[in-house]
Structures are given as C-alpha cells and as structure tokens.
Image: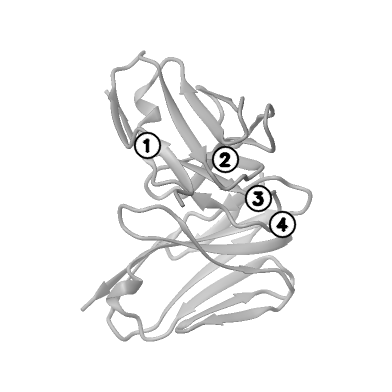
C-alpha cells in the first residue's frame, strides 16, 4: 500500500523556471493538501482541496497554483520560481476534513538558485 | 490570524530524562492532533484529542488537552534515542477545513 507518493524527491531550479510537483494517493481520500516546511516555521498550508475539481487557498498561496482534476492526484505548480520558494514541500491527504488524520508524503526538496 | 504556538523550539536532554512540549492556541480548538517527524522524514500522526481535559497515554508518551480546549501538552517519560525528532501539535478550528500546525519542538537525546 503506497499511501501518498510525491514526485520528484529532489529538484534544483533556476530563478524564473517553472515546474510541477505531483502528489498521488491511493487511499480514496477526499481532502488533499500542499504544505511547505521551512526551518523554525513548522508546516504552512499553501493550497488545499476538499474534492475532485475543487481547490482553495491556504496560508501562503502566492506564487503557486494547484489543480485536482482527478481525485487521487493533486498538482502544485510554480510558474516562475523564486529563491524564496526554496523549501521542503509536503503533500498530505485525509479521508475528509475536521478530526481526520492527515497522511503525508515523503516530501520534495526544492532549491531555487 | 489563527495561530498555534509551540514551545520550546529545541530541547536537548540526556537519555533517561523527561521531556515536555507545550502548545497554545489563540482560539478554541475543536480538536488537536500530534505528529512526529524524524530527521529527514515526514510528519507521522501520533494521536488526536477531542474532549476538554482529555488525557491519553501511549507507552511513555502522555498527551493532554486543556479544559478550555486552547492548549495541549506532550510529555515523554525517560526519553530514549528513538524519541529523537520534531514534535508538532496541530489544531482544527471549528468550521474549518484547515489544520493549523505549531512550529514544532525539536528533541535531541544524548545517549
């Protein structure tokens, strides 16, 4: 049982380049989330989705876009990467929302030079 | 905005000593969850507390939820090197789809 799978695991970008991070879950969860983790700042929510075809902004959405075309996949896009987006990105999913456990992927370590 | 504060940021203990991390919210929480992240790993769910004043134990770990549902704590008795990692509290606000994470407490254990 794979759970939540993130690709790629590592990536180095130059300023201004674009990329897409893929998150896939095989647990038939309705809710999916994208977080970024920076030293000393915990996990900050970028965007989330409460179901296929829906997305919503989190705490730090600027510079990112997302899509949830299929229930099992949640894509995070960076249109024009900036050094401030150097971070570790985690995807998570949960069965529904409140009071449900979030299951995290292994993370993507992104460096923007 | 809605915030969940967590202290201390770091704790370095000798193996066998106890450890406690505290979590405080600016607003009432519907429930609170605790996660552990090993170095280089991802957050893994430990436990959820829902009721006011609730106390739950997992072996050497004791979790408490405050009477006002605004604070929580995690206490580890007799730490072991396997306890190393960052512990996060995360709170659900009423009528919210978003889990608000504390900044985490990084635990280091000297063997």
Crowd tier of the residue under label 1, counting other residues whose Cα lies within 10 Å: few below 14, some 14–19, many 20 or above: some
Write down the residue under mark 4: B27
Dot 3 and dot 1 within a common chain: yes
In what element is the residue under mark 2?
Answer: strand
In space, the residues marked 2 and 4 are separated at their CA atoms by 22 Å
Using residue B51 as the reference point, say whether residue B44 is left or right of it.
left
Front: mark 3 or 1: 3
Using residue A17 as the reference point, say whether residue A62 is left or right of it.
right
In space, the residues marked 1 and 2 are separated at their CA atoms by 16 Å
Crowd tier of the residue under label 4, counting other residues whose Cα lies within 10 Å: few below 14, some 14–19, many 20 or above: some
* On screen, residue B8 above or below A15: below
Write down the residue under mark 3: A95
In what element is the residue under mark 1?
Answer: strand
Q: Nearer the viewer, residue A13 or B11?
A: A13
Crowd tier of the residue under label 2, counting other residues whose Cα lies within 10 Å: few below 14, some 14–19, many 20 or above: many
Q: What is the quadrant of the C terminus of chain A in the image?
A: top left
> In the image, residue B64 lies at what x, y percent?
61, 77
Say whether disc 3 or disc 1 marks the residue closer to the N-terminus: 1
Write down the residue under mark 1: A87
User: Could you tell me which residue is drawn at 52 percent across and 52 percent down?
Assistant: A103
User: Could you tell me which residue is drawn at 65 percent across and 56 percent down?
Assistant: A100
* Labelled pair 2, 3 in contact (Cβ < 8 Å): no
Write down the residue under mark 2: A33
In what element is the residue under mark 4?
Answer: loop
Dot 1 and dot 4 within a common chain: no
């Amino acid at each position: 049982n794979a759970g939540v799978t993130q690709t790629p695991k590592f990536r180095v970008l130059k300023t201004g380049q674009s990329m897409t991070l893929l998150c896939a879950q095989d647990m038939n969860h309705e809710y999916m989330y994208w977080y970024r983790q920076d030293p000393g700042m915990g996990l900050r929510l970028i965007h989330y989705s409460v179901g296929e075809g829906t997305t919503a902004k989190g705490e730090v959405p600027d510079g990112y876009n997302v899509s949830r075309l299929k229930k099992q996949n949640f894509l995070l896009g960076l249109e024009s990467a900036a050094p401030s987006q150097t971070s570790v990105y985690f995807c998570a999913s949960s069965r529904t929302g409140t009071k449900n456990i979030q299951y995290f992927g292994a993370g993507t370590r992104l460096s923007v030079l | 905005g809605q915030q969940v504060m967590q202290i201390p940021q770091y704790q370095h203990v000798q193996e066998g000593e106890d450890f406690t991390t505290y979590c405080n919210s600016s607003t009432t929480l519907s429930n609170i969850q605790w996660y552990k992240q090993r170095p280089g790993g991802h957050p893994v769910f430990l436990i959820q507390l829902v009721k006011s004043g609730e106390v739950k134990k997992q072996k050497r770990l004791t979790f408490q939820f405050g009477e006002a549902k605004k604070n929580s704590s995690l206490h580890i008795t007799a730490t072991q090197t396997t306890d190393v990692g960052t512990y996060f509290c995360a709170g659900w606000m009423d009528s919210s789809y978003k889990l608000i994470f504390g900044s985490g407490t990084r635990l280091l254990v000297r063997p």
